[in-house]
Amino acid sequence: MKVRIDQKQLADAARRAHRLLPSKPLMPVLAGLLLQAGDGHITVSGFDLDTSTRASLAADTLQPGETLVSGHLLAGVAAAMPPGPVDLVADDREITVSAPGTTFTLPTMDRHDYPALPAPPGINGTIDGDLFAAAVTHAATAVLPPDEAVGSMEACPGVHVAANGDRLTVSATDRYRIVRYTLDWQPSQDGDGELTILGTALAATTKQLAGHKVRLGFPGAGGGVAALSSDTLTVTSRTIAAPYPNLERFFPDPDKCTGWALVEAAELKAAATRAGLVNDTEADPINLAFAEDLVVVSGGKGGSSGSTSVGIESDGLDGFGISYRPGFLASLLAPIDGQVRIRFTTPKKPALIEPVDDDTYRAVCMPVRPQ
């Protein structure tokens, strides 16, 4: 294999692929990156048996071929090369990475031991990469820890993505919070489908694809492999096969709520975070006490206390009180820019959180009993 490629492109591709490689792989070859040179391009691929990445880069191919090299070494060497053209020359034993005045020689790994990369499914539709990454990254903060995923919650360490017509929903829950985004997307002829992927993995993938149009390929019935791709990068991920729970039934009906508060999201988030500072643990609740035009957010335990009053508009909440874990409430308010309307039913039932100026996002927060 003999290839000439731009240093920055090689460094970026190697860095992105290396980030997804396992630190302690089940097989040594899974710590490698596969380089495959064809006519006018080179593909840099990594695979950990659950997620694969393929970056396709323009290159001058003098001799086609392929080789497998340590991802850690290649990423470090590519980043250290001087800007400009870089030559890659590989045989069965080693690969030489060179530019004028700089040369590295790295041992290659046994290509025959490397597992076959999964074939990506067909494309179901396209979505704005920045919007998708923002939604998935925030949803991933509200997934269930894997060691708590039992029974009907088996799929909840994942972020669920579902397409219905020209709408794509991104959902996550940890039983105490529900995050739901509803985004516009451009479906293909067979656009409907769904996938559930571990939240950390899907967030990492969407961050890599931000800034581009992202094409989604859903797995077949019963789970399998899903694909997310841009013009230069394709990522396949093994999906969680367990069915995702129906979260819609947990969203309170606005018509059945007994009262609502209208408040600046940033102010309430800051008040919740501030009140939690005097709690003993993150799990200790803070209390929200409502009057006609303000809410007092208070926390404290073991002699410490603190409170903040925040101005609100409200209806039906005079004398109402409710308690939340401060981190959970703050996390649901975090993506909201401007005012938020929170609808309440009783101190024991979940509240509905809806931004005033953004109809793409809704959230549910489950209260806790004050201690």
Image: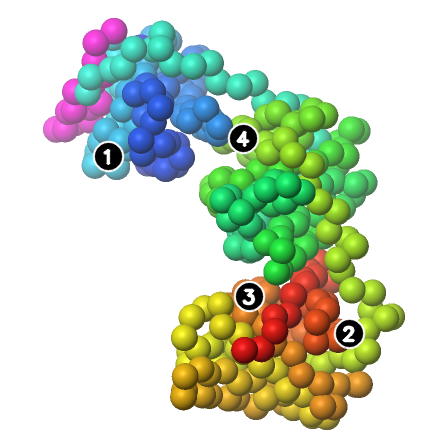
The secondary structure type at the circle numbered 4 is: strand
For residue 123, which quarter of the picture? top right
**Residue at figure coordinates x 63%, y 56% from the top left:** 175
Give the crowd class for mark 1: few <14, some 14-19, many >=20 residues within 10 Å. some
Q: How many marks?
A: 4
Span of residues in magenta: 92-105
Residue 328 is labelled as: 3
Give the crowd class for mark 4: few <14, some 14-19, many >=20 residues within 10 Å. many
For residue 17, which quarter of the picture? top left
Labels 2 and 3: the sequence-earlier one: 3
Residue 21: say if magenta. no
Identify residue type, mark 2.
Thr
Give the crowd class for mark 2: few <14, some 14-19, many >=20 residues within 10 Å. many
Are the residues at dot 1 and dot 2 in contact (C-beta closer than 8 Å)? no
Q: Is residue 179 above or below residue 48?
A: below
**Residue at figure coordinates x 19%, y 20% from the top left:** 106
Q: Quadrant of the C terminus?
A: bottom right
Q: Does residue 190 appear left or right of residue 202 in this picture?
A: right
Residue 345 is labelled as: 2
